[in-house]
Image: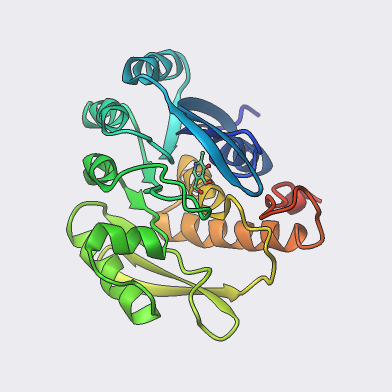
C-alpha cells in the first residue's frame, strides 16, 4: 500500500539527532513517506551547535514548489525556520492553503543555548498552525511569562490557543512533576494533562522535533488532534527508553527512533 506523504520544513542537524534528520526517521518509523524542505544547515554534534547557515528564502520556496507540485502531501510540520525572511516564505505557502494540517514546532533555542530562530519569525507562522508544540522555554518566550510549573504550562497553552492555533501542546518532559513527563494539551476549548513516566536519560536530543513529526504522521492518517498527540507522546517515550544505554557522541545523544518497530 502506498504510504501517506508528510513534509517537514526544518533545519539540518549534521549529528542527525534533531531537525530534518529526526523528522525523516520518525516519519519512516511510523510508516509515512517523508519529504523535506531545508531552511538552514547547522554544524552540530551531541555536544552542541557549532555553526548555522540559514538558506535564502527563495531556495525554501523553490523546494516547497518542487515537493508540493508533485506529492499529495497530507500533513506538514515546521521546525527551525532560522530567519524572519524564511518564516515569511513558509507563511506565504500556508496562507495560500498549500500546507495542510500544519504542525508548528516553534523552535527558538537549542538546548546548548544556540539561537535557532526568533519569536518574530515563529509568530508569522503560528496563525496558520492547526497544532503548535512549544516546550516550556518556547511557551515562555511566546507568552512573555515564566512557564516553570504545570499551572503555568496550562495558562500559557490557553493563552497561545486564544491567539491563533486551534490546538496547542506545551511539552513538559523536563517539568518537575514527581517522576512524570507532563504535557498540556488545549484542544477545542478543553485542557487535558498528558502524563507518561519520565525516562531518566541524557539522550534526549531531538525529542521535540520527533514529537511534532509524529503528530504530523497521525494527522496525515486522518486522526483527530488529541489522538495524534497521545500516540506521538507514546512514540517519544518509547524512543527515549530505547536510547538509554546508547553511547553516540560525548554529549546529549539521539533517540532510538526505530525501537518502536523492534
Ligand atoms: O530541537 C530543536 C532543533 C531543531 N532543529 C535543528 C536543531 C535543533 C536543536 O538542536 O539543531 C536543526
Reply above or below: 211 against 102.
below
Quarter that holds the N terminus: top right
Q: Residue furthest front?
A: 50
Residue in view at x 27 percent, y 48 percent: 119
Q: Quick check: 225 above or below 97?
A: below
Tell me the residue at 45%/64% (across/down).
171
Q: Quadrant of residue 151?
A: bottom left
- Vertically, is 179 above or below 85? below
Q: Which sits in the foreground, 228 or 12?
A: 12
Q: Residue reaching furthest bottom?
A: 178
Give coordinates of residue 250: x percent, y percent.
74, 52
Image height of 208 relative to 59, above or below:
below
Q: Position of residue 91 (x, y in %)?
A: 26, 32
The residue positioned farthest toward the left in the image shown: 163
**Residue 110 located left or right of residue 142:** right
Residue in front for this viewpoint, 212 or 204: 204
Which residue: 62% across, 27% down?
2
**Could you say where residue 25 lies in the image, as x and y percent from the top left?**
65, 39
Q: Residue at x 52, y 47 (%)?
A: 209
- 152 horizontally vs 53: left or right: left
Is residue 255 shown left or right of residue 52?
right
Structure colour scheme: rainbow
Residue 224 point in image, percent of width and height: 41, 54
- How many numbered discs? 0
Looking at the picture, tell me which residue is in the foreground, 226 or 38.
Answer: 38
Amino acid at each position: 500500500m502506498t504510504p501517506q506523504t508528510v513534509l517537514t520544513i526544518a533545519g539540518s542537524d549534521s549529528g542527525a539527532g534533531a531537525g530534518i534528520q529526526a523528522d525523516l526517521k520518525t516519519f519512516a518509523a511510523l510508516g509515512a513517506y517523508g519529504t523535506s524542505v531545508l531552511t538552514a544547515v547547522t554544524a552540530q554534534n551531541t555536544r552542541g551547535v557549532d555553526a548555522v547557515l540559514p538558506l535564502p528564502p527563495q531556495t525554501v520556496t523553490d523546494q516547497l514548489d518542487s515537493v508540493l507540485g508533485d506529492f499529495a502531501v497530507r500533513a506538514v510540520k515546521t521546525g527551525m525556520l532560522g530567519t524572519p525572511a524564511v518564516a515569511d516564505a513558509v507563511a506565504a505557502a500556508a496562507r495560500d492553503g498549500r500546507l495542510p494540517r500544519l504542525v508548528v514546532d516553534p523552535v527558538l533555542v537549542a538546548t546548548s543555548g544556540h539561537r535557532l530562530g526568533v519569536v518574530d519569525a515563529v509568530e508569522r507562522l503560528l496563525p496558520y498552525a492547526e497544532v503548535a508544540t512549544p516546550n516550556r522555554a518556547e511557551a515562555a518566550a511566546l507568552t512573555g511569562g515564566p512557564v516553570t510549573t504545570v499551572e503555568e504550562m496550562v495558562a500559557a497553552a490557553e493563552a497561545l490557543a486564544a491567539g491563533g492555533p486551534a490546538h496547542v501542546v506545551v511539552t513538559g518532559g523536563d517539568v518537575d512533576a514527581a517522576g512524570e513527563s507532563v504535557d498540556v494539551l488545549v484542544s477545542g476549548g478543553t485542557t487535558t494533562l498528558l502524563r507518561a513516566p519520565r525516562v531518566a536519560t541524557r539522550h534526549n536530543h531531538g525529542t521535540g522535533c520527533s514529537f511534532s513529526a509524529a503528530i504530523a504522521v497521525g494527522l496525515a492518517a486522518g486522526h483527530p488532534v488529541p489522538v495524534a498527540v497521545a500516540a506521538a507522546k507514546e512514540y517519544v517515550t518509547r524512543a527515549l527508553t530505547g536510547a538509554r544505554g546508547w553511547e553516540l557522541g560525548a554529549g546529549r545523544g539521539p533517540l532510538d527512533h526505530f525501537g518502536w518497530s523492534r
